[in-house]
């Protein structure tokens, strides 16, 4: 279907990005994949390219754009080339809204120039070993001591946790109330060089191999009060306000992966001969790819509408939950069917479809599981 969601600026960005990926990422990607991490100096190159500054105001070194569609283009181009930019998506897509919305002017002056040029990489630490989706049950504490908070606790599954220079840490600054267990959570922007801050294991994941996902430990880490993000004890509401954007990101990332999977399967089946003719010539192959394309068209319509709603500041929590649920489940089906068309080679990691299959699986888990999305949608329906 003809898409109308992008304008000439988005397409120019696509061309620049495609050339950059071909020159700076593809030649090194297998090495990054084996190492399980993107070298930190690569983030400086992304900064030079302007990737991190698209939505940052010009006064802090950014481009001052308000459209989130540039991020969607980036996901599409990475999926097309079967690569990723490591943990940088958390830096640009997830952390930036917190900084733009809740930072003081003084904090923006300190943090945003380095954010833009890639010398001050950000991560966000919500999940704890015993909490999962139940963020209100977090145990990490930040106790006020004069002009500092003293941070103690642990976090896990923190994307970008190895390479991060600053991490937005969710911690309890007050006990929960009897009638509101979400009360008492605050956001602290923690310098990763602080004494008592420790990066634990770089976790070995099924997919997203180039994304450094880590455990973090805090032992009496002293965080200056001026590094509190927003107001004390209001952190949970801040997290909720930014979740729709995070879930939209996962939705259009899933769409991009599904689109790439169809392209990979189409190319493979046209080149692979069985019984003396291309696999693509068999009716089953045509029917499978046609069914995948029809489902992708539905995903595309949904994602494009979500992008327009986001840019108009009209994307609701229920909208984002519906998008995430539909797109992640549909992408999982498409990618599985495309892998099947590769036969035994679909199980070999040298083929992009195999890595894509592993990378995609987490989309139904992080940012809120599919089951949580159903709960949000049902509540919005009055059920």
Image (spheres, rainbow, N blue to C red):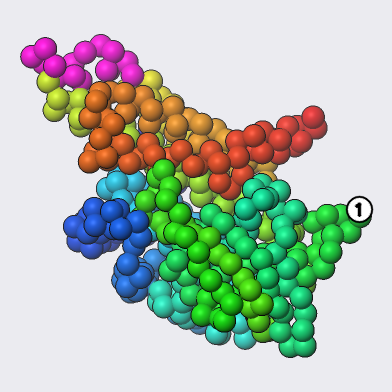
| Residue at the image position 23 percent from the left and 63 percent from the top | 24
Percent x, y of residue 82 = 29, 46
Indicate the position of residue 272 as horizontal and vertical percent values.
14, 25
Left or right: 325 as drawn, with respect to 265: right
Viewer-proximal residue among 252 and 111: 111
The span picked out in magenta is: 274-288
Q: Nearer the viewer, residue 64 or 131?
A: 131
| Residue 117 percent across, percent down from the top left | 40, 76
Residue 244 lies left or right of residue 120; in this view the side is right
| Number of marks in picture | 1
Q: Quadrant of residue 41?
A: bottom left
The answer to whether residue 279 is above or below residue 315 is above
Q: Mark 1: few, some, or many residues within 10 Å (few <14, many ≥20)?
A: few
Q: Residue at x 25, y 11 (%)?
A: 283
Given the current orientation, which residue lies at the most extreme left position?
276
- Rendered position, 322 above or below 133: above
Q: Is residue 62 magenta?
A: no
Q: Is residue 278 magenta?
A: yes
Residue 292 against residue 217 in the figure, above or below: above
**Image quadrant assignment for residue 296:** top left
Residue sitting at 31 percent across and 36 percent down? 354
Up/down of 207 relative to 143, above or below: above
- The quadrant of the image that shows the C terminus is top right
Q: Secondary structure at mark 1?
A: loop
The majority secondary structure of the magenta stretch comes to helix
Would you say 182 lies left or right of 153 here? right
Query: Residue 232 or 5: which is nearer the viewer?
Result: 232
The residue depicted at 52 percent of the width and 76 percent of the height is 192
Image coordinates for residue 218, horizontal then vertical, percent: 62, 71
Per the image, the residue denoted by label 1 is 179
Q: Is residue 339 visible?
A: yes
Left of 55 or right of it: where is 207?
left
């Amino acid at each position: 279907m003809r898409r109308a969601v992008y304008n000439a600026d988005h397409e120019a960005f696509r061309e620049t990005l495609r050339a950059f990926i071909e020159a700076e990422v593809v030649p090194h990607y297998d090495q990054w994949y084996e190492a399980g991490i993107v070298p930190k100096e690569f983030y400086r190159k992304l900064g030079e390219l302007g990737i991190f500054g698209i939505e940052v105001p010009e006064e802090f070194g950014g481009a001052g754009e308000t459209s989130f569609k540039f991020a969607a283009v980036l996901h599409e181009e990475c999926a097309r080339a079967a690569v990723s930019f490591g943990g940088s998506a958390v830096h640009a897509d997830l952390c930036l809204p917190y900084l733009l919305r809740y930072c003081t002017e003084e904090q923006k002056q300190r943090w945003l120039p380095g954010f833009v040029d890639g010398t001050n990489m950000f991560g966000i630490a919500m999940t704890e070993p015993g909490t999962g989706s139940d963020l209100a049950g977090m145990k990490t504490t930040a106790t006020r001591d004069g002009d500092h908070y003293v941070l103690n606790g642990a976090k896990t599954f923190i994307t970008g946790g190895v390479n991060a220079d600053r991490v937005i840490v969710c911690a309890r600054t007050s006990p929960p109330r009897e009638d509101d267990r979400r009360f008492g959570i605050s956001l602290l922007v923690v310098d990763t060089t602080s004494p008592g801050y420790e990066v634990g294991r770089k976790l070995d994941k099924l997919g997203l191999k180039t994304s450094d996902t880590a455990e973090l430990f805090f032992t009496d880490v002293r965080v200056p009060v001026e590094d509190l993000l927003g107001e004390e004890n209001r952190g949970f509401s801040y997290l909720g306000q930014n979740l729709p954007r995070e879930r939209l990101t996962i939705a259009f990332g899933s769409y991009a992966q599904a689109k790439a999977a169809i392209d990979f399967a189409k190319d493979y089946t046209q080149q692979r001969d069985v019984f003396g003719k291309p696999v693509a010539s068999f009716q089953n192959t045509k029917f499978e790819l046609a069914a995948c394309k029809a489902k992708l068209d539905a995903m595309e319509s949904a994602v494009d509408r979500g992008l327009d709603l986001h840019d108009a500041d009209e994307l609701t929590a229920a909208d984002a939950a519906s998008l995430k649920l539909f797109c992640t489940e549909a992408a999982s089906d498409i990618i599985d069917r495309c892998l099947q068309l590769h036969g035994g080679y679909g199980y070999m990691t040298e083929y992009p479809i195999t890595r894509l299959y592993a990378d995609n699986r987490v989309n139904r888990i992080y940012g809120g599981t599919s089951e949580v999305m159903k709960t949000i949608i049902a509540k919005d329906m009055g059920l």
